[in-house]
Image: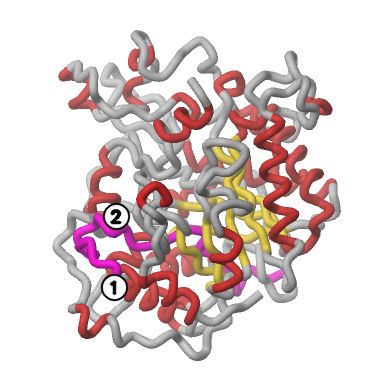
Amino acid sequence: MSPGHYTRLMSRRTLLGAAGAAALAGAGARMAAPRSVLAQAPASATATVRKCVSMGPINTPDGDDQDLRAHGNLDLLTSTGTRWVKLFVRWDQVQPLPPSSVPWDRLDDPVANPGQPFLAALEAQVELARSQKPAIGVVVMPWLFPKWANGTGHLVDGIPGDLDFFPQDRMKAEAVAAGDPEATAKKLVYRVPDAEQLAPGGHWGRWIDFLYRRLLRHGEGVAIEVANEPNIQWWPQRDPAPGEDPFAQGGLASPRAAARMIATAQEIGDRHCNRILLAGPGTWDGPQGEPELVRDSRLYTDYATFTAALLDELDKIDFAARSRFVWTQHNYMDVLFRHGSPGAPRNRAAHTRSLLVGRWSGWPQLNGEKEAPGVWLTEGGADLRAKAVGGDPLVQASLVRRNWNRMATGDADGDGMGMVTNYLGYSESHYDTGMRDPLELGGAPRPLEQTWAELPSNG
């Protein structure tokens, strides 16, 4: 299966299992305010927050619609005053063969490594962003796990036997019980490798060290975000269930894996004098509705439960974040449902930050104290297909603007927020949050692009 087709099948926003449909469809009853009200919302005049656009994963190493070098994507950043960009790099694309076949020191060899063009594409995009005047900061997201690294190399998605492999961690119980051959299952590349492979000397640890060393020359304006929505994309989310029912609720597994990865990344950073930023865990801010009212699932963990459990796991291993480790979260739900606005539920980004106080010593601490943790929101947006947007590009733009105003004021919900990100320049079929129509439909600018340009530009 070609890399391009593979990406489409398991695209970054394929939210799987019980949480997926709710998160994407926006099926709740809360609706956005009328257009006449939304269109008048001004941008915050006191904003100091960084403005970032997240590109999507690329399908091909040259000319993809999500490639910063192509189709006017760089112009989208510069013309809107966007000073940061998030770039995905798929581990399974860069390193499709195990180190026993292609040693680590030959990953940059186009003869030895069939994934070298994807590595070259990443590095060319980072170089382009950093060469701008002023330089554009880059968040690099190393995404997915090669099957050779996570114990699924003997399987292929979508063929007989695939769905017999830990179905309780990949599918809804009712779909398995019904024997539904069309059931959506989490893809094999979302399976988290075993604990030893997440250590500094394991496959994942060596992958992060490889990227860190490659990005060192770009210095201060680069961050590696070590996880992406681990509380919904990864599997297993849960430990083995007690008793005979494999679908029964076990303990939480994903926060434990995330803690190991955060600790590994920091150890690697220490080796290199912490010369570039680290970031994570990139938590999905779902599900829709108040998490405490949502039924437990083996397929996802709500943002608040995951955050608290991850902090507990970090405490168990006596982890203390360096000042150059940034806590990250996504805020799609905050954008769509105006969380934090009068009459709406609490803002989830602000709630997460409150959970970090006294427990996270990362960026941008003063005097090394765990008192003022900051948060970067490395993805967010309003999907045109969600009920709260109703297919109206003006409502989409207004929801994004209102979220910015809440996040960028420096007080209340915005206290400690260091970055706000819109996911996608050109929209994709998997998530319609872009500032422009999908490229295959012409790529016309939406009102969101102009709205985004009106927001303050910060470094």
Q: Earlier in the sequence, mark 2 or mark 1?
A: 2
The residue furthest bottom is 45
**Residue 416 in view in this figure:** yes
Residue 386 in the magenta stretch? The answer is yes
- Lateral position of residue 111 relative to residue 450, left or right: right
Q: Residues within 10 Å of mark 2 (few under 14, many from 20)?
A: some
Look at the picture and state if 393 lies above or below 284: below
Q: Which residue is mark 2?
A: 291
Q: Residues within 10 Å of mark 1 (few under 14, many from 20)?
A: some
Q: Residue at x 29, y 38 (%)?
A: 297
Look at the picture and state if 33 lies above or below 248: below
- Lateral position of residue 155 relative to residue 104, left or right: left
| Mark 2 vs mark 1, CA separation in Å | 29 Å
Q: Which mark is residue 104?
A: none
Report helix, strand or loop for mark 1: helix
Displayed quadrant of residue 30: bottom left
Which-is-in-front pick, marks 2 and 1? 1
Q: Residue at x 34, y 9 (%)?
A: 160
Q: Which residues are magenta?
A: 368-393
Look at the picture and state if 207 lies above or below 303: above
- The foreground one among 49 and 391 is 391
- The foreground one among 167 and 219 is 219
Residue 404, percent from left and from top: 44, 76
Report helix, strand or loop for mark 2: helix
Q: Which residue is mark 1?
A: 394
**Residue 315 in view in this figure:** no
Residue 397, percent from left and from top: 35, 72
